[in-house]
Amino acid sequence: MANSDSRRDPRATLRFSAVLTTLAGATLIWGCSSGSSGGSSSGGAGATGGASGVAAQSGGSVATSGGVTIGGSSEAGGSVVSGGTSASGGTTLLSSTGGKTPDSGGTAAAGGRTGSGGAVESGGATSSGGAVGSGGSVAEGGSLASGGSMATSAGGSPASGGMATGGMRSTGGETAAGGSLATGGGGTTGGITSAGGTKATGGTVSAGGTTTGGASGGHVGSGGTTGSAGTSGAGGKTTAGTGPCDIFAAGNTPCVAAHSTVRALLGAYNGSLYQVTRASDKTTKDIGVLSPGGFANSATQDTFCTGTTCTISIIYDQSGKNNHLKQAPAGQRKATPDNLADPTALKFTISGHTVYGVHLPVGYGYRVDQTTGIATGDQPETEYMVTSGTFYNGSCCFDYGNAETDNHDDGAGTMEAVYFGNWTSQGKGAGNGPWVMADMENGVYAQASFAANPNDPPLTSPYVTAMVIGRSGSFALMGGNAQTGTLTGFYDGVRPNGYNPMKKQGAIILGIGGDNTATAQGDFYEGVLTSGAASTATAQAVQANIVAAGYGN
């Protein structure tokens, strides 16, 4: 802090039909066909009606045809069995759901071996129905798990192949990979579904295509069972993916503190984001996420606080370091604890989800003095916050970052925090602000001096990304619109005189100065502190993640 003395689905229609074909004393029943029958060929010749077909003749062999799957074209040729692929008197039933193949009265030949006299005649040419998907596989025993629909015809003629739309992407976020995986069953895809194609004895079927977070389809062996479909995004869940802290970790600058009442900042985070305390009975409630890596479950707060008022009593650290933000205690400039935020005061939407930010008027603030892993001395660090370009003032100091552990001004270089506002008593940017600057104690800087930095422009969008990168001997300022675009570098150079080396102490503050000056105001949505100075590429990747989160949408 600075010295304040100067201050959102087409689907194919499935119909079930039973086609009974008597082959060498065995009965073969296929279920869940789609599309109309392509007719029979008394000699066993196959007529292709779908994306692919196999015509077979000799000894009563049966050709199956795969379906067409929109969202990943597939050619699933099925398996050809002739001359005794079924055990004598056996009935093989391929169920349309679940992918199980029970045996009845006999055992199907393993691997789809062709008996003598079962050669495929030249009349059974396979049609070129489309590219073979790389995802699925077909067991030679004839089991086919496919995102599309499948049909067979008596006498070896495939039925006219039906269409499966491949499913619709769920609007909530999580996408089922492969959907319901069954013989001829419909599939839901998170992108491209490939099915059928490659032969393998016993065949493993994986849900083809690009998936995000959904459960993949299971394995289908000879007579095996399919895996269950992925979880849909219904109910407002989001996919587990990549968060800002995953990106920082990949850049060798891991998060040592991560705070947000809006969303998880790690893809696997499934804990609490913040705690609210109810005024009526002083009980507390932790507010978690809808799913790992997802958005806040704000409905929990709404229910808990109905009929009374609440405050945000804790903002939990998601990094695992337990650097939780709580009510800021009294300090040098304000001799009483700061106020706690009203959890309902900053309601907005992000990617269609209603959530709450932290609204901090004058006199409100959070702090943790005893921390783990936060940079001290001249150690490098990166700090960012998402704040608002529409709620700020010209007083000291709306900060988020590294500060003194004793709540006093301990001299130049004893703190390093992101500042946002239009205070002009010390450093300043171009125009009238608000600007991203660095509060290094006894000075808020837009560059290496208090002179106005013409390269540090006002940021007035509703959601602003503000970042400070601190190194030994230098620092950098970056910022941008948290809803679109990339970060802009405002300054990258030496530190001011008297700030090299730095003497950082490692406390964390939000909304106040290091000596508990609490005359500024602002909004806070998310922020992190890392160990190490992030590269420009890492900083830009974090910005892309923030934009993709969908603030205000």
Image (cartoon, grey):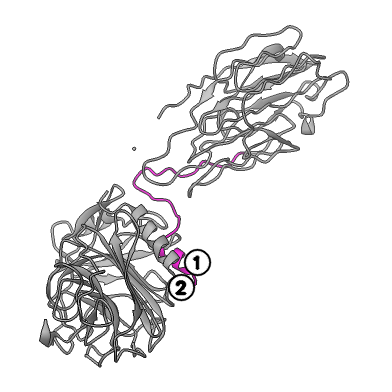
Q: Nearer the viewer, residue 193 or 390?
A: 390
Q: Amino acid at mark 1?
A: Ala
Q: Residue 381: which numbered mark, if any?
A: none
Q: Does residue 28 show up magenta in the picture? A: no
Q: CA distance from mark 2 to mark 1?
A: 7 Å
Q: Is residue 281 visible?
A: no
Q: Position of residue 166 (x, y in %)?
A: 50, 32
Instruction: Tell me the residue at 39%/50% (across/down).
Output: 238
> Residue at the spot x=46%, y=33% of the render?
167
Badge number at residue 250: 1
Characterize the local packing of mark 2: few (<14), some (14-19) or many (20 or more) Cα atoms within 10 angstroms.
many
Badge 1 element: helix
Q: Position of residue 217 (x, y in %)?
A: 57, 42
Residue stretch rendered in magenta on the structure: 226-252
> In which quadrant of the rendered image does the N terminus lie?
bottom left
Tell me, yes or no, if residue 32 can be seen here.
Answer: yes
The quarter of the displayed image where residue 450 is located:
bottom left
Q: Quadrant location of residue 389?
A: bottom left
Measured as percent of width and height from the top left, residue 328 is found at 21, 80
Tag 2 residue: 253
**Type of secondary structure dominating the magenta stretch:** loop
Where's residue 458, x and y in %? Answer: 20, 65
The kind of residue on which mark 2 rests is: Thr
Say what secondary structure mark 2 lies in: loop
Q: Is residue 316 above or below residue 549?
A: below
Q: From what the image shows, is residue 474 above or below residue 19?
A: below
**Image point (80%, 15%), residue name:** 122
